[in-house]
Image (cartoon, rainbow, N blue to C red):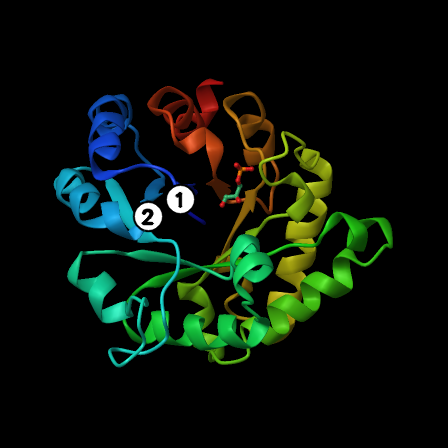
């Protein structure tokens, strides 16, 4: 049985003060919700404030990125050790915006995934095709390469501790969601690749969908057999919409 994960990626939004206001509304709305993991990934500058407010709540803390070394002369970077010190449980790795704007590659995804696991952080490894790739019929080969290369650094037994997020680039922030059937198709495909890499672990890996997830589409997405949760951008910034996504059965 895979426990669903509803994760909010706040991207480059939310000051510490804005985070506090959001959480003051959000936490009471989700405190009674059971049988799922709720994760918030604020920007680095709000991690500390959000982490303090989450203490004693069922909501877990995640980061949006990290550097794959414990410490060193890497100006502007944040290490897994620093995230651990803030009680982070999760870290997003290889988000398409990092690949698109900051030159991240499958090689850096592999390094970061390994470093996250070695430091007790659960990596949420993001994969997804662009619109051009989808239209050329390249979705499956693109995803397969991203998975095989991005997970090349981990052992079969470590698969149980990772989370994959399938985020078609064309669906991110566009209001254009993949249909539940399309999302399920790709998530099931991802699971077959995982099964070829780690046969004993593939059924345990949580696979999330991300890309314009909203209260209106979450229930149908969650009804798909290989979709184990969502990585939510815009709709995680408001307490009302993200709490409805977390309470997906009621929508
Ligand atoms: O990490 C989250 C995804 O990029 C989805 O963002 P979105 O829900 O704003 O489309």
Circle 2 SS class: loop
Q: Identify which residue is drawn at 47% across, 69% down.
A: 159
Circle 1 SS class: loop
Q: Quadrant of residue 239?
A: top left
**From the viewer's perspective, is 141 left or right of 32?**
right
Q: Identify which residue is drawn at 36% across, 39% down.
A: 36
**From the viewer's perspective, is 84 left or right of 69?**
left
Residue labelled with disc 2: 43
Q: Identify which residue is drawn at 27% across, 25% down.
A: 26
Reply above or below: 236 against 111: above
Residue labelled with disc 1: 12
Query: Looking at the picture, how far across and down is residue 9, in whole percent?
Result: 41, 43
Q: First in sequence: mark 2 or mark 1?
A: 1
Cβ(mark 1) to ligand 1 < 8 Å? no
Q: Quadrant of residue 49?
A: top left
* Of the pair 44 and 139, the residue shown nearer to us: 44
Residue sitting farthest toward the front: 75
Query: Looking at the picture, how far across and down is residue 104, in whole percent?
Result: 54, 67
Q: Number of labelled discs?
A: 2
The answer to whether the residue labelled 2 contacts the one labelled 1, judged by CB atoms less than 8 Å apart, is yes
């Amino acid at each position: 049985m895979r426990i669903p994960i509803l994760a909010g990626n706040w991207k480059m939004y939310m000051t510490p003060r804005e985070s506090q206001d959001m959480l003051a509304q959000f936490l009471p709305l989700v405190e009674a919700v059971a049988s799922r993991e709720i994760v918030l990934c604020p920007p680095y500058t709000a991690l500390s404030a959000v982490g303090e407010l989450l203490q004693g709540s069922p909501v877990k803390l995640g980061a949006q990125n990290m550097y794959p070394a414990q410490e060193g002369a890497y100006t502007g970077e944040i290490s897994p050790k620093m995230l651990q010190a803030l009680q982070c449980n999760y870290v997003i790795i290889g988000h398409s915006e990092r690949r698109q704007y900051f030159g991240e590659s499958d090689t850096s995804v592999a390094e970061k995934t390994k470093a996250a696991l070695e430091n007790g952080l659960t990596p949420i490894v993001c994969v997804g095709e662009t619109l051009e790739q989808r239209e050329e019929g390249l979705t499956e080969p693109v995803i397969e390469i991203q998975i095989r290369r991005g997970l090349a650094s981990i052992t079969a037994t470590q698969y149980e501790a990772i989370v994959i997020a399938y985020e078609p680039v064309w669906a991110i922030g566009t209001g254009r969601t993949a249909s539940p059937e399309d999302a399920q198709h790709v998530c099931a495909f991802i699971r077959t690749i995982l099964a070829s890499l780690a046969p004993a672990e593939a059924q345990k890996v949580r696979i999330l969908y991300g890309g314009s997830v909203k209260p209106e589409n979450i229930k149908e997405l969650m009804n798909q057999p290989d979709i184990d949760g969502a990585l939510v951008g815009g709709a995680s910034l408001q307490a009302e919409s993200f709490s409805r996504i977390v309470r997906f059965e009621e929508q």
